[in-house]
Image: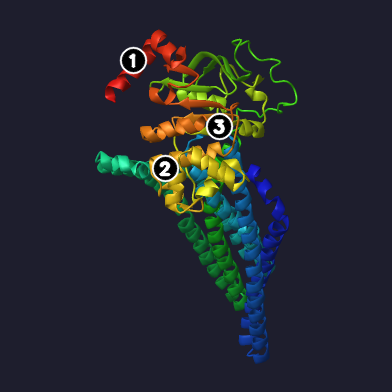
Amino acid sequence: MKKLLVYLKEYRMQCVLAPAFKMLEACFELIVPLVIASLIDKGIGGENMPHIIKCVAILGILALVGLTVSITAQFFAAKAAIGFATRLRSELFRHLLGLSFSEIDTVGTSTMITRMTSDVNQAQNGVNMFLRLFLRSPFVVFGAMIMAFTIDSHIALIFVATIAVLFAVVGFIMSRNIPALLRAQESLDKVTRSVREGLNGVRVIRAFRLEADSVKSFNGVTDELTGRLKKAGHISALMNPLTYVLINLGIILVIYSGGLRVESGILTQGQVIALYNYMSQILVELVKLANLVVTLNKAMASANRISAVFDINTSMREGDGVDFDTDPDDDVLETESDAGSEAVSFRDVSFAYPGSSEDSLENISFVVNKGQTVGIIGGTGSGKSTIASLIARFYDVTGGGVYLFGHDIKDYSYDQLHSLVGTVMQKAVLFSGTIESNIRMAAGDVSEDVINDAVKKAQADEIVKGKGGIKACVEQGGRNFSGGQKQRISIARTLAMRTPIVILDDSSSALDYATDLSLRRALKELPEDTTVFIISQRTSSIQHADKIIVLEDGHMEGIGTHEELLKSCDLYKEIHESQLHRS
């Protein structure tokens, strides 16, 4: 929790004023029993009507001022808590976006969603309750005890003993409750993951009639969460009954001892009532304190989980940037005599995904020159998309090096990489908004002509016209677009960037052959120094490429043109012939 308090710095004034006003309210509360004692002893006992009216007026003023002070304190506490949560959520989101794909894969999407929503809300509630009660409740408890000493030191010892036992009980319950709540929040991650997978895969579930299995799996994780929440609830539920029992025992002792001392003439009836009121105040405040402890337990458990995410540092370090004024050909690899300058090169690259003991790529080396179109083909899991991820530096290689225009990719700043490499991901993703806003996400403030040109090259102009233009609405996840339509809008988004390297990661899989052919022809119209990578399962999509890389199980089985590979690479020939027979 201490690590997160930095997000309260902007709200120092509110963090001081909220408890200060609460303390002021507590002072007014502590005066009330003395006024009541005076009302009983001097007013009612002495049949002094003016004194009774005076005491009632004082009580009315104390109530009004206390209400005003309390509302003011609530305002400052709420403002600080909401501001804290806003900053925390913003920084957490920024931190998560700054992680590399390796850390994101390790943390998991469901965990990140839970941290951003449930855990931040719990931390916000904890801050709110803490500012309102962390000083007020102890102040009233100890203040009531001190006021009891001013009335009668003998009975005040009962207050001391009762408070000591109560704090021991609260401390014991807190020590058991925090670990139980941590385990419950871990189960909440599993529930979030199950819900997310079920909703995202609802079509698959229905297609294979797996509703019963899905419900059974969901019930399993919810039962686990329920069990852990019950265990935590059983522990925290002891707080109120134990508090009430101990306080009521204290009240019985106060009334009994007070009655004896009234008979002895040591105390007045009003003083006994005042002592009773002070013990009742302690009861109310300890109930509040008990609820505060439960809330803080949840908040601290959530804060620890949020802190754990902040402790995850990205394994990927941003480069200082490459000076493009220097000649990029100074340190390029030797290539064919008729080739242009180098655009992308892999030098003995090996890569393994986090947590995997096997390399997804092993000793991959190739050179791609400016303006070339490169096809990458291979079976599922052969490493095609991994190569695309390494060129865009979504991951860092575990061995060897990736070079762009003769410079190590790790030397580039992220802004430079964004300006050099445009990637169409394997899974087309659209965001709620408009077609134009989705394209501008990557391209930024480009002209409408550039957007229209990108839409045309991506074979998406008919889609845009059919939807009513580039201002047409895109629903969440692009659910009002088909798979092929989403792919074409995604391609347009990347083409509008006009980067010198374009990667199409199996991004035309949902397109028919005629549209795929039109797209490949349109890609030929890109500036002649644009380097294009086409990752595909179809040989027809890449057979006209200047260079084709064939992968199998992370190894490069062949490289060359379509005609060369048909002669020299059995795997490529087998893939091509199998597709010819299917067609």
Q: Amino acid at mark 1?
A: Glu
The residue singled out by tag 1 in the image is: 574
353 or 516, nearer to the observer: 516
* Residue at (45% x, 50% y) in the render: 465
Q: Position of residue 268 (x, y in %)?
A: 62, 77
The residue singled out by tag 2 in the image is: 485
Mark 3 is surrounded, within 10 Å at the Cα level, by few (under 14), some (14 to 19) or many (20 or more) other residues, namely: some
Whether 263 is drawn above or below 214: the answer is below
Q: Classify residue 299 as left or right of residue 554.
A: right
Q: Which label number is shown at residue 526?
A: 3
Quarter holding the C terminus is top left
Q: Amino acid at mark 3?
A: Leu
* Residue at (67% x, 71% y) in the render: 28
Provide the secondary structure element on which disc 1 rests. helix
Q: Residues under labels 3 and 2: Cα distance?
A: 21 Å
Q: Classify residue 219 as left or right of residue 389.
A: left
Mark 2 is surrounded, within 10 Å at the Cα level, by few (under 14), some (14 to 19) or many (20 or more) other residues, namely: many
Q: Position of residue 161 (x, y in %)?
A: 58, 56
Coloring scheme of the render?
rainbow
Provide the secondary structure element on which disc 2 rests. helix
